[in-house]
Amino acid sequence: MIGRLRGTLVEKTPGQLLVECGGLGYEVDIPYTTFFHLPEVGQELTLHTHFVVREDAQSLFGFAERLDRDLFRLLIRVNGVGPKLALAILSGLDAHQFIRCVENRDTNALVKLPGVGKKTAERLLIDMVDRIKQLEGQFLPFSPPGNRPVTPAPGPVATEEAESALIALGYKPQEAAKAIARVAEDGMTPEALIRQALKAMIPAS
């Protein structure tokens, strides 16, 4: 099991990274909540990881916080929730927000996530209510690894990249375009657009 990576960030796109460790380049799938807290390309980073081996593929998933990684492991044990859906859930809600949804029995926030219908949301609330107790002691406020300066991207390019990222996450093109248009302001980066659009679609509980 690969439980942690520490290395140099070589490439980053919404949903995936390339991290070099000891001369090896690891492709790592990540939720957007981790993407928002990444350092600049060329800098060192540490990720808490989960390695999945299947007959047709091997996938490495990375998270900025151990709490997110441990919650991911609990989510994929729920019937009907695979790694892709678990990653989508943690892209729309960070671990603390998801835990509050479970504690508050908030199905409304969960069904707004792509791929989560009413039955899946209800199953998550039932199955996770006891499992999240395993995370006791990790409920600490998240401290990003430093605020990094960002260079504003041209509006149309940022909008196109943000819409593509939301579509890849599972939202319909119309939903993505509408959400981006609602929050878009001059000079916003793709990361800022994605973050604000997700907040608009999935208000914090």
Image (cartoon, rainbow, N blue to C red):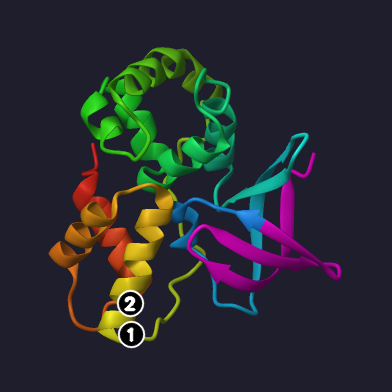
Q: Which residue is mark 1?
A: 152
Residue furthest out toward the left: 182
Q: Left or right: 162 with respect to 182?
A: right
Q: Amino acid at mark 1?
A: Pro
Q: Position of residue 180 (x, y in %)?
A: 22, 64
Q: Which residue is mark 2?
A: 158
Quadrant containing the C terminus is: top left
Instruction: Name the foreground residue: 80 vs 106.
Output: 80
Cα distance, mark 1 to mark 2? 9 Å
**Would residue 9 be counted in the magenta stretch?**
yes
Q: Nearer the viewer, mark 1 or mark 2?
A: 2
Q: Residues within 10 Å of mark 2 (few under 14, many from 20)?
A: many
Secondary structure, mark 2, is helix
Q: Left or right: 82 with respect to 46?
A: left
Instruction: Name the foreground residue: 143 vs 122.
Output: 122
Residue at image point 43% right, 55% down: 168
| First of labels 1, 2 by sequence position | 1
Residue at image point 47% right, 13% down: 130
Disc 1 and disc 2 in contact, CB within 8 angstroms:
yes
Q: State which quadrant residue 23 falls in.
A: bottom right
Q: Position of residue 8 (x, y in %)?
A: 70, 71
Residue at image point 42% right, 81% down: 149
Q: What is the number of callouts on the image? A: 2
Residue furthest out toward the right: 23
Secondary structure, mark 1, is loop
Q: Residues within 10 Å of mark 1 (few under 14, many from 20)?
A: few
Q: Position of residue 144 (x, y in %)?
A: 46, 61
Stretch in magenta:
1-27
Q: Left or right: 170 with respect to 106?
A: right
